[in-house]
């Protein structure tokens, strides 16, 4: 099919020429400077259109249908961590947050190793086109033993339910480059009307099966303008463990009772 209109760009510096040649690569391996320049013009048109929105439309959060193209897995195991000091009456909340942070760090390490192991077994399937993974902890349960070992560590066991999104070039293009998979956030429903959320303009909730929490959910920010596929940032698949902001509705950290200790440590 022929094209009705044509525009010509003139330039003389070598740096512009090199830059344009690098950016002209298409997913099919071919190069097209016209395709790249047209994408820039399209982006500017979208920017201009968004500026024309009236103030009432700017303040509206658009909620999109649930995102269901996900894989769900459970990661569990034993963890060993630095002995947790006893709570002090004056700073119980601060101490609890510190303990929570240390435990979550240990669990994130286990999740990272587990996902990495699974990814390495299917490397060609997951990274043939620069695609990346986003790993989201949807809920976590951890029982830990406060008894300190001779080495100065405590032990525990955990179960983390995770949602994984495999973001390929085709998946990115499916949503017009507007779904910001790099910045998935946990948002409480009561905060959806606040200004810091409204600036996202659009939100797409991740689908969950029988979510353990009803206070909030995970949302993909939906941009008003397209964004280029970020393959140049991730030479290897991104393993991004999104935190739950210490939300008690989704995180259960409990000291072991005698029954738990006998079951796990004999």
Image (spheres, rainbow, N blue to C red):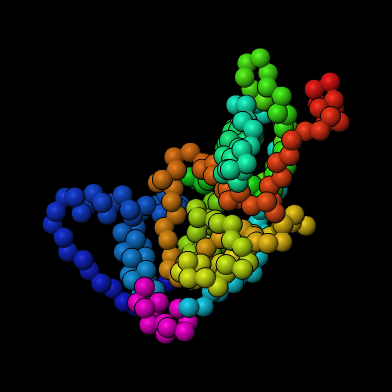
User: Is residue 131 positioned above or below 24 on the image?
Assistant: above
Which residue does the image show at 58% across and 43% down from the upper left? 90
Q: Residue 261 is drawn in which quadrant?
A: top right
Magenta stretch, overall SS: helix
Q: Residue furthest front?
A: 90
Q: Quadrant where the N terminus lies?
A: bottom left
Q: Position of residue 9 (x, y in %)?
A: 21, 66
User: Is residue 130 positioned above or below 154 on the image?
Assistant: below
User: Is residue 42 positioned above or below 125 on the image?
Assistant: below
Q: Position of residue 234 (x, y in %)?
A: 45, 43
Q: Which residues are magenta?
A: 47-58
Q: Is residue 251 magenta?
A: no
Left or right placement of residue 57 versus residue 165 in this view = left
Q: Position of residue 136 (x, y in %)?
A: 61, 48
Q: Position of residue 5 (x, y in %)?
A: 31, 77
Q: Residue furthest top?
A: 150
Q: Is residue 227 visible?
A: yes
Left or right placement of residue 226 versus residue 92 in this view = left
Which residue does the image show at 27% across and 54% down from the upper left? 20
Front one among 52 and 2: 52
Q: Quadrant where the C terminus lies?
A: top right
Q: Is residue 111 visible?
A: no
Front one among 245 and 67: 245
Which residue does the image show at 48% across and 71% down from the upper left? 195
Q: Residue 65 is drawn in which quadrant?
A: bottom right
């Amino acid at each position: 099919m022929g094209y009705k209109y044509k525009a010509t760009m003139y330039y003389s510096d070598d740096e512009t020429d090199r830059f344009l040649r690098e950016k002209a690569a298409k997913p099919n391996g071919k190069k097209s400077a016209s395709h790249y320049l047209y994408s820039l013009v399209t982006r500017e048109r979208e920017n201009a259109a968004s500026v024309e929105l009236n103030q009432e439309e700017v303040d509206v959060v658009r909620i999109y249908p649930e995102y269901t193209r996900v894989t769900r897995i459970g990661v569990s195991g034993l963890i060993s961590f630095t002995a947790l000091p006893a709570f002090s009456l004056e700073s119980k909340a601060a101490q609890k947050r510190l303990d929570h942070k240390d435990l979550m760090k240990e669990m994130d390490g286990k999740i990272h190793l587990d996902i990495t192991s699974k990814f390495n077994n299917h490397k060609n399937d997951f990274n043939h086109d620069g695609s990346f993974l986003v790993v989201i902890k949807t809920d976590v349960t951890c029982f830990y033993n406060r008894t300190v070992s001779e080495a100065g560590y405590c032990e525990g066991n955990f179960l983390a339910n995770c949602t994984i999104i495999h973001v390929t070039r085709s998946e990115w293009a499916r949503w017009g480059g507007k779904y910001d998979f790099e910045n998935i956030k946990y948002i409480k429903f009561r905060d959806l009307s606040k200004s810091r959320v409204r600036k996202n303009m659009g939100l797409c909730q991740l689908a969950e099966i029988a979510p353990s929490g009803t206070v909030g959910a995970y949302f993909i920010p939906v941009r008003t303008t397209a964004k280029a596929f970020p393959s140049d940032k991730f030479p290897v698949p991104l393993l991004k463990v999104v935190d739950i902001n210490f939300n008690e509705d989704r995180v259960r950290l409990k000291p072991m009772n005698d029954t738990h200790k006998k079951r796990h440590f004999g």
